[in-house]
Amino acid sequence: MKVKIEKKSILDINADVTVVNLFEGVKVPSGVTGITDKAYNNIISDFVIKSEKFEGKYGEIYELPLIEQHKKIFITGLGKQSEFSLTKIRDLTAKVVRKCNGSKNINKVVSILHGAGIAGLDPEDCAQMIAQGAISGNYSFDKYKSKKDNKNLKEFIIAEIDDEKYKKAKKGMERGIIIGECLNMARDLINDSSQYIYPETLADFAVKNSGVKTTVYNKKQIKEMGMNAFLAVGQGSVHEPKFIHMEYIPEKKAKKKIAIVGKGITFDAGGLDLKPPSSMLTMRDDMSGAASVIAVMRAVSEIKPDVEVHAIIAACENMPSGSAYKPGDVIISKTGRSIEIDNTDAEGRVTLADALAYAEELKVDEIIDIATLTGACMVALGTVASGIMGNNDKKIKEFIETAEKAGERFWQLPMYEEYGESLKSDIADTKNTGGRMGGASAAGIFLSGFVSKTPWIHLDIAGTAFIDKPNSEGIKNATGIGIRSLIKYITEG
Ligand code: BES
Ligand code: MG
Ligand code: ZN
């Protein structure tokens, strides 16, 4: 499906479906919806609104057939004007696209630029959200199905006749397309099975798709770099671990230098502390952080901000076997800090310990890690918000605000030092875990021991990366959470 914008009246674009909108309670349509109403003999105001078949509630889509033209108008509900937001534009557009793909004979859609009329939102932001929603709404994972999902929609066109709005919207749409496509790329990678996605194939994927210089280190090189903690986690698997470093250096002098670190456990069986079957079922998603940072680099390579960005993945598989690392093992990590393994299922933090240490050696201004780290974070925040922690409250606040604008929710969890009590070890500098209580915060404290002075943010996406029920955007399974916030934070922060 192609997303485009045309500087024309919505009435002059020939399409199978024309999408207009109404706020809740509006009796007399105005703007582009008003023009459309008039062009079709007041059919919206006289028939649809008066019949009370459509109230304009958020997410409502009223399908109005125009018999002669063999075309349709979709009147979409924007809800209450006071509760309207950019996120709603994105989610509504995704819904429209899914509806079109669900009905035969719809190949081309033309849409109003939602939000840029009486709602008074910035046309650039609105178009960006429409493009994102259209592309993300067009997503499905049917790689292994012999009968492919129905995707008849070929063109999604935004109509905007006003010159100034058109120019802004075009820019926003272009950015939205990049973001939407990077998001879908990550979702494909996360949804795929760990039978096919293991450290080597994940690294190949990064080399082919990150759009930037990508270096892959093998087991011998990882050992030479002193990353024993990372190696320990992967030693039970038949698949060799890979350490992946992607780098984007801007042409102009960089305003700042950021490292993003993605948890890359291509499958988390739990190791010798084996997970119960129901918890293991979706553990191919334990590389969601890794997929996110690859997608972010791809977007960065296209957007080209004046920021130097490094993306790091310590990719391995956490499996039980005769060679697996064991509870009670003591490992000397890259920084020299020793770790007593209390539970082999708390493996992500052990790999991140070395990845964070590597990131800090790059002398960056800030480090952000993104990880499906703890079931405890999922218990605390559900699938609604992701956890955020770190050593710099100002940057955490900034990130939360940026994420909000990108349509993603992060909620700060505390890192009081008491959460670290349970990590005290009799034989090493730290244990990797100390029990279930306050688990997300304890994991945050554990990670903080491997970042000495660089401002650092930790994103725990365990509850939000992979979901079994569709969210407000209609996304199920891999969500690609974090990608949009990171892109915005890096390129506009
Ligand atoms: N990958 C899991 C965390 C997870 C849980 C991600 C649910 C997505 C959904 C992580 O490696 C893990 O197993 N954590 C343990 C830690 C515990 C042993 C301290 C957990 O949360 O149970
Ligand atoms: Mg685990
Ligand atoms: Zn894990």
Image (tube, rainbow, N blue to C red):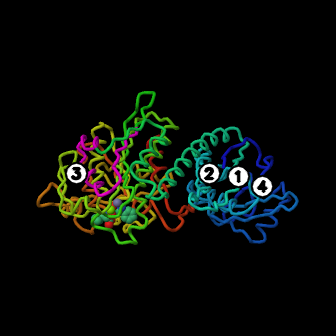
Category of crowding for the residue at label 4, using alpha-carbon neighbours closer than 10 angstroms: few (below 14), some (14–19), many (at least 20): some
Q: Nearer the viewer, residue 234 or 213?
A: 234
The quarter of the rendered structure image containing the C terminus is top left
Category of crowding for the residue at label 2, using alpha-carbon neighbours closer than 10 angstroms: few (below 14), some (14–19), many (at least 20): many
Which quadrant of the figure shows ligand 2? bottom left
Measuring 24% from the left and 40% from the top, which residue is drawn there? 224
Category of crowding for the residue at label 1, using alpha-carbon neighbours closer than 10 angstroms: few (below 14), some (14–19), many (at least 20): many
Pointer 4: what residue?
A: 16
Which dot, 1 or 4, sits closer to the camera?
A: 4
Q: Which mark is residue 111?
A: 1
Mark 2–mark 4 Cα distance, whole angstroms, equals 18 Å
Percent coordinates x, y for residue 310 in the rendering: 38, 39
Which dot, 3 or 2, sits closer to the camera?
A: 3
Q: Earlier in the sequence, mark 1 or mark 3?
A: 1
Q: Nearer the viewer, residue 272 or 8?
A: 272
Instruction: Please tell me in which quadrant of the rendered image residue 312 appears.
Output: top left
Q: Earlier in the sequence, mark 2 or mark 4?
A: 4
Measuring 55% from the left and 56% from the top, which residue is drawn there? 87
Q: Earlier in the sequence, mark 1 or mark 2?
A: 1
Q: Secondary structure at mark 3?
A: loop
Mark 1–mark 3 Cα distance, whole angstroms, equals 51 Å
Amino acid found under the numbered disc labelled 2: Ile
Q: Which residues are magenta?
A: 220-246
Q: Which mark is residue 449?
A: 3
Q: Which mark is residue 130?
A: 2
Mark 4–mark 3 Cα distance, whole angstroms, equals 58 Å
Residues tagged 1 and 3 counted as in contact (Cβ below 8 A): no
